[in-house]
Each structure stands twice: as structure tokens, then as C-alpha cells.
Image: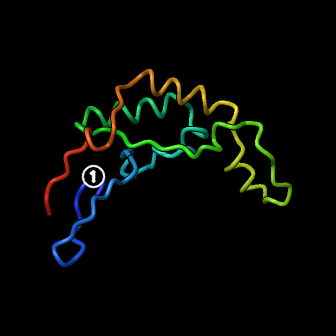
Amino acid sequence: MRFPHLLAAGSGRVIAEFPLSTVGWGGWRFPVAGGGYLRLLPYAVTRWAVNRLNREGQAAIVYLHPWEIDPDQPRVAAATMKTRFRHYVNLHRTEARLGRLLGDFRWDTMSRTFAVDAV
């Protein structure tokens, strides 16, 4: 499931699941919510994706790791080229992009934003 829902966990218990945001394009589904996507994709793509989710009547779930707003973090010299790319590219842009995202859209807590149907 793409959007928040409850899962039966046995013995009458339920787990609320909050999948990270994805959007469909060209018959494919793409993740758009993670810190890596905010860093690696042009901001216009992130803004388009959140707008699209909102037009579908859904709120976006976006997350960052704290290290993603620290462009001066120590570098791991032994990391592979692929890991260095995924981890370090555009760190210097993350804080500003987060600021734009927070300014461009309305945000709230998950408990106030999502009403999850009962199982």
C-alpha cells in the first residue's frame, strides 16, 4: 500500500504503517521522500511530487537524516565511489532545500495529518 494504513498484527493488535511517499510516472512508481532524493533530484522534482500527492488528496511523508544537513561532516576515505556519491552529493544544498520545502507547503504532525482506517 502507498498510503498510511493499519495492519493486523495478531491477537487483536494492529500496527500503523506510514509508507514513504512515492509518485507514479510513465507506468513506474518512484520514491520521492527520502533525504537522498531531496539531495539528488532537482528541487523542482520534489515540489512537483508533493504537489501531485496533495492533488491526490494525500499528504507527503518526507524524512531526512541529521547528517544530511551537515556539509562539513568527515569524509570516509575508504568508501566506494558509489557510496561517496550517494552520501555526499549536494550536502551543501540540503538545508536550503528543506527550508524551501517547509515554506512551500503546509506541514503538521503525523497524528494530526493521517486518519488511518481500522483493519
Mark 1, residue position: 4
Horizontal arrangement in the rendering, residue 56 relative to residue 76 (left or right):
left
Colouring mode (rainbow / by chain / secondary structure / one colour): rainbow
Q: Secondary structure at mark 1?
A: loop
User: Residue 108 lies in what quarter of the image?
Assistant: top left
In the image, what residue occupies the spot 48% across and 44% down? 63
Q: Amino acid at mark 1?
A: Pro
Q: Residue at x 69, y 37 (%)?
A: 70
Write the residue at 16% across / 73% down: 12
Q: Is residue 63 left or right of residue 20?
A: right
Packing grade of label 1 (10 A; few <14, some 14-19, many >=20) is many
Image quarter where the C terminus lies is: bottom left
Residue furthest out toward the top: 103
Q: Position of residue 3 (x, y in %)?
A: 28, 51
Q: Give how far across and how far down residue 42 sits, in percent.
A: 56, 32
State the image coordinates of residue 98 (x, y, percent, origin top left).
53, 30
Quarter of the image where one finds residue 51? top left
Tell me where residue 49 appears, x and y as whole percent.
40, 36
Identify whether 26 is placed above or below 13.
above
Residue situated furthest bottom in the rendering: 11
Q: Is residue 95 left or right of residue 34?
A: right
> Closer to the camera, 9 or 45?
9
Q: Nearer the viewer, residue 53 or 107?
A: 107
10 is higher (above) or lower (below) than 92 = below
Q: From the viewer's perspective, tell me whether residue 45 is left or right of residue 52.
A: right
Judge by depth and name the residue closer to the eye, 4 or 28.
4
Q: Which residue is depicted at the point 27% across and 44% down?
A: 111
